[in-house]
Amino acid sequence: MKQKTVFGHYDPNARGMTPPEVEREVQVLRSIDHHTIVKLHEVYEQEDYSVIILELVTGGELFARVAEFERLDEREAVCFVAQILQGVHHMHQLGIVHLDLKPENIMIENMEEKRIKIIDFGLARRLNPNEVIQDMAGTPEFCAPEVVNFDPITFATDMWSIGVMTYILLSGISPFAGDSQAETFQNILECSVTFDREEFVDVSQEARDFITRLLRKNPRKRHTASECLHHAWVKVSRLFLH
C-alpha cells in the first residue's frame, strides 16, 4: 500500500523551540510505533532548521469536531477516548509522557471508522525514575494541579489531561477554564468538578465515574491508562470501533 506523507517544517525560532528541544521531540517520535500515534518517516537536518516528514492525517482536529457540534454523542466520545488511552498507555510503557494532551493535538484519521492519531510531541519527554522533573508545561486549562504547583511530573499528569478532554468532549465545556490564566489555575487547584449542568443530563453514570477517577488532585489516586482501559465505560467502545 502506498504510504502517505506530509512535510512539516519545524523552525525552532518560529515554534519557540531550541535545537535540543527539537531533537528531543524527534527522538521521542522515533521510539514510538503505535497505530494511534502519528508516525515519523524522516528528518533532514539543516544548519538553522529541521525538515520533518510525518504521516499524513487529513481528517482534521478533534477540537474542530467538538466546535462544530458543541459536544459529542457519548458513543462517539468513548471511541475517541479509548484510542487516546491506547496510545498513552503505549507511551507510558516506554517511559514517555506527552504533557500536552488536548483536542487540538488529536487528529482524526478516518471519521467513518472513528480512527485518530495523537500528534505534537514538542513537550514530550522520557521520565527517568532517578530524575525529578518540574515544569510549567502544557496548555493552562489542561494542566494538572502538580504542574500548576510546580511539583514533580508523573505519568498521572497525562491522565488528568485525558479527564479534562473527556469532560469537554461530552459537554462542550472546559471544567476549569477561567477568565484569566490565574483564575484557571486557581480552579484547577480547587479541583471542584461538577456535573450539575444541563449538558450532562444525558451523560451516563459510567462516563461521569470515568472522569471523576482522572480529575483527582492527588496524582497517586488517579487511574492509570491501563486501569482506564479496563473501566466499564471504556470497554463499551469495543462494540463501536471497527
Image (spheres, rainbow, N blue to C red):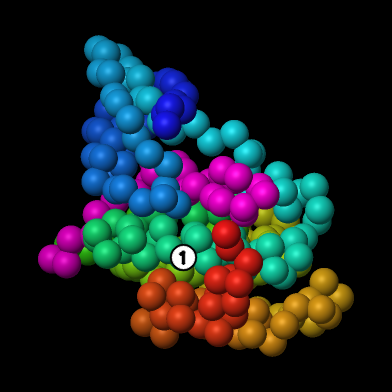
Which percent across, then down, holds residue 30? 26, 40
Which percent across, then down, holds residue 156? 39, 71
Task: Say which residue appears at 49% left-offset and 69% top-offset.
Answer: 160
Which percent across, then down, holds residue 98? 39, 54
Q: On the image, numbered disc 1 is attached to which residue?
A: 85
**Residue furthest out toward the left:** 130
In front: 83, or 177?
83
Tell me the kind of residue under disc 1.
Leu
Task: Say which residue appears at 46% left-offset and 43% top-offset.
Answer: 119
**Residue furthest out toward the front:** 1
**Residue furthest out toward the top:** 47
Left or right: residue 45 compared with residue 122: left
> In this orientation, does residue 101 appear?
yes
Q: What segment is highlighted magenta in the picture? A: 105-130
Left or right: residue 163 compared with residue 15: right
- Quick check: 98 above or below 185? above
Task: Say which residue appears at 72% left-offset and 70% top-offset.
Answer: 74
